[in-house]
Image (tube, rainbow, N blue to C red):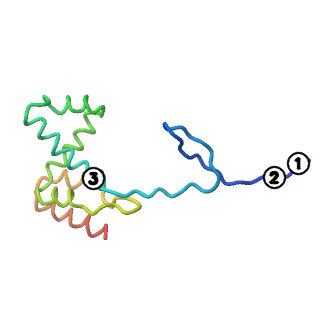
Protein backbone atom coordinates (compact mmCIF):
# COMPACT_ATOMS: atom_id res chain seq x y z
CA UNK A 1 0.00 0.00 0.00
CA UNK A 2 1.44 3.27 -1.00
CA UNK A 3 -0.08 6.67 -0.76
CA UNK A 4 -0.24 9.47 -3.29
CA UNK A 5 3.07 10.70 -4.70
CA UNK A 6 3.85 14.36 -4.35
CA UNK A 7 6.21 15.86 -6.93
CA UNK A 8 7.61 19.39 -6.85
CA UNK A 9 10.60 21.18 -8.29
CA UNK A 10 12.75 22.79 -5.61
CA UNK A 11 16.18 24.36 -5.40
CA UNK A 12 18.37 25.94 -2.75
CA UNK A 13 18.42 29.72 -2.88
CA UNK A 14 20.55 32.16 -0.93
CA UNK A 15 19.38 34.15 2.00
CA UNK A 16 21.28 36.85 3.90
CA UNK A 17 24.78 36.07 5.19
CA UNK A 18 25.23 33.08 2.88
CA UNK A 19 22.40 31.05 4.42
CA UNK A 20 20.52 28.72 2.15
CA UNK A 21 16.81 28.12 1.96
CA UNK A 22 14.60 25.87 -0.10
CA UNK A 23 12.71 27.67 -2.85
CA UNK A 24 10.00 26.53 -5.22
CA UNK A 25 10.62 26.12 -8.94
CA UNK A 26 13.60 25.62 -11.19
CA UNK A 27 17.01 27.01 -10.30
CA UNK A 28 17.42 30.33 -12.12
CA UNK A 29 20.13 30.38 -14.76
CA UNK A 30 23.09 32.39 -13.52
CA UNK A 31 23.87 35.32 -15.77
CA UNK A 32 27.33 36.80 -15.37
CA UNK A 33 28.03 40.24 -16.65
CA UNK A 34 31.17 42.26 -16.47
CA UNK A 35 34.90 42.10 -17.03
CA UNK A 36 36.17 38.68 -18.15
CA UNK A 37 38.06 36.83 -15.41
CA UNK A 38 41.22 36.52 -17.54
CA UNK A 39 41.29 40.33 -17.94
CA UNK A 40 41.09 40.70 -14.15
CA UNK A 41 43.94 38.21 -13.74
CA UNK A 42 46.04 40.08 -16.33
CA UNK A 43 45.51 43.36 -14.45
CA UNK A 44 46.34 41.60 -11.19
CA UNK A 45 49.59 40.24 -12.63
CA UNK A 46 50.60 43.73 -13.76
CA UNK A 47 49.74 45.15 -10.34
CA UNK A 48 51.65 42.40 -8.52
CA UNK A 49 54.69 42.96 -10.73
CA UNK A 50 54.62 46.64 -9.77
CA UNK A 51 54.42 45.79 -6.06
CA UNK A 52 57.50 43.58 -6.37
CA UNK A 53 59.42 46.15 -8.44
CA UNK A 54 58.58 48.96 -5.97
CA UNK A 55 59.72 46.84 -3.03
CA UNK A 56 56.30 46.84 -1.37
CA UNK A 57 56.51 43.05 -1.21
CA UNK A 58 59.67 40.96 -1.30
CA UNK A 59 58.74 38.33 -3.88
CA UNK A 60 56.03 36.12 -5.34
CA UNK A 61 56.12 33.82 -2.31
CA UNK A 62 55.17 36.74 -0.08
CA UNK A 63 52.39 37.73 -2.46
CA UNK A 64 51.06 34.17 -2.38
CA UNK A 65 51.03 34.19 1.42
CA UNK A 66 49.33 37.58 1.59
CA UNK A 67 46.76 36.58 -1.03
CA UNK A 68 46.06 33.18 0.54
CA UNK A 69 46.82 31.34 -2.71
CA UNK A 70 49.38 28.70 -3.49
CA UNK A 71 52.73 29.69 -4.93
CA UNK A 72 51.87 27.56 -7.97
CA UNK A 73 48.67 29.53 -8.60
CA UNK A 74 50.48 32.83 -8.25
CA UNK A 75 53.09 31.58 -10.73
CA UNK A 76 50.30 30.79 -13.20
CA UNK A 77 48.88 34.29 -12.85
CA UNK A 78 52.29 35.96 -13.10
CA UNK A 79 53.01 33.87 -16.21
CA UNK A 80 50.60 36.11 -18.10
CA UNK A 81 53.34 38.77 -17.99
CA UNK A 82 55.40 36.71 -20.44
CA UNK A 83 52.80 37.26 -23.16
CA UNK A 84 53.60 39.68 -25.96
CA UNK A 85 52.57 43.26 -25.02
CA UNK A 86 49.88 43.43 -27.70
CA UNK A 87 48.32 40.18 -26.42
CA UNK A 88 48.33 41.55 -22.87
CA UNK A 89 46.59 44.67 -24.12
CA UNK A 90 44.05 42.61 -26.08
CA UNK A 91 43.26 40.60 -22.94
CA UNK A 92 42.77 43.77 -20.91
CA UNK A 93 40.35 45.09 -23.55
CA UNK A 94 38.28 41.93 -24.02
CA UNK A 95 34.60 42.85 -24.29
CA UNK A 96 32.42 42.49 -21.20
CA UNK A 97 30.83 39.12 -20.58
CA UNK A 98 27.11 39.30 -21.23
CA UNK A 99 26.09 35.73 -20.37
CA UNK A 100 27.59 32.28 -20.25
CA UNK A 101 31.30 31.61 -20.18
CA UNK A 102 34.14 34.08 -20.66
CA UNK A 103 35.26 32.73 -24.03
CA UNK A 104 38.94 32.48 -23.07
CA UNK A 105 40.32 31.33 -19.74
CA UNK A 106 43.69 31.57 -18.04
CA UNK A 107 44.00 27.80 -18.30
CA UNK A 108 43.49 27.94 -22.07
CA UNK A 109 46.14 30.67 -22.31
CA UNK A 110 48.79 28.53 -20.60
CA UNK A 111 49.80 26.98 -23.93
CA UNK A 112 50.29 30.49 -25.35
CA UNK A 113 52.24 31.55 -22.23
CA UNK A 114 54.56 28.53 -22.56
CA UNK A 115 55.57 29.71 -26.04
CA UNK A 116 58.67 31.90 -25.71
CA UNK A 117 58.61 33.41 -29.21
CA UNK A 118 56.18 36.33 -29.43
CA UNK A 119 55.48 35.61 -33.10
CA UNK A 120 54.35 32.08 -32.27
CA UNK A 121 52.39 33.44 -29.30
CA UNK A 122 50.55 35.78 -31.64
CA UNK A 123 49.66 32.91 -34.00
CA UNK A 124 48.36 30.80 -31.11
CA UNK A 125 46.45 33.78 -29.71
CA UNK A 126 44.92 34.41 -33.14
CA UNK A 127 43.86 30.77 -33.33
CA UNK A 128 42.24 31.13 -29.87
CA UNK A 129 40.32 34.20 -31.01
CA UNK A 130 39.08 32.53 -34.19
CA UNK A 131 37.75 29.61 -32.11
CA UNK A 132 35.92 32.06 -29.82
CA UNK A 133 34.05 33.70 -32.71
List the residue tagged with mark 1: 2
Report the residue at 27% width, 33% height from top. 67
Q: Are marks 2 and 1 in contact (CB under 8 Å)?
A: yes
- Residue, far right: 1
| Crowd band around label 3 with a 10 angstrom C-alpha radius: few (<14), some (14–19), many (20+) | many
List the residue tagged with mark 2: 5
Closer to the camera in the image, 43 or 114: 43
- Where residue 80 sits: x, y (%)? 19, 49
- Where residue 90 sits: x, y (%)? 18, 61
Report the residue at 37% width, 58% height from top. 33
Q: CA distance from mark 2 to mark 3?
A: 48 Å
Residue 133 located left or right of residue 4: left
Report the residue at 24% width, 43% height from top. 76
Give the mark nearer the N terminus: 2 vs 3.
2
Above or below, 28 against 46 in this view is below
Give the mark nearer the N terminus: 3 vs 1.
1
Residue 3 located left or right of residue 82: right
Label ID, residue 104: none
Label ID, residue 38: 3
Amino acid sequence: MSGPVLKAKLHFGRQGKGRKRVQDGERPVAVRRGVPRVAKLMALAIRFDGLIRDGVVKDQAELARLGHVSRARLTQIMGLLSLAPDIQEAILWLPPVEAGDDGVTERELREVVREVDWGRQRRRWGAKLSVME
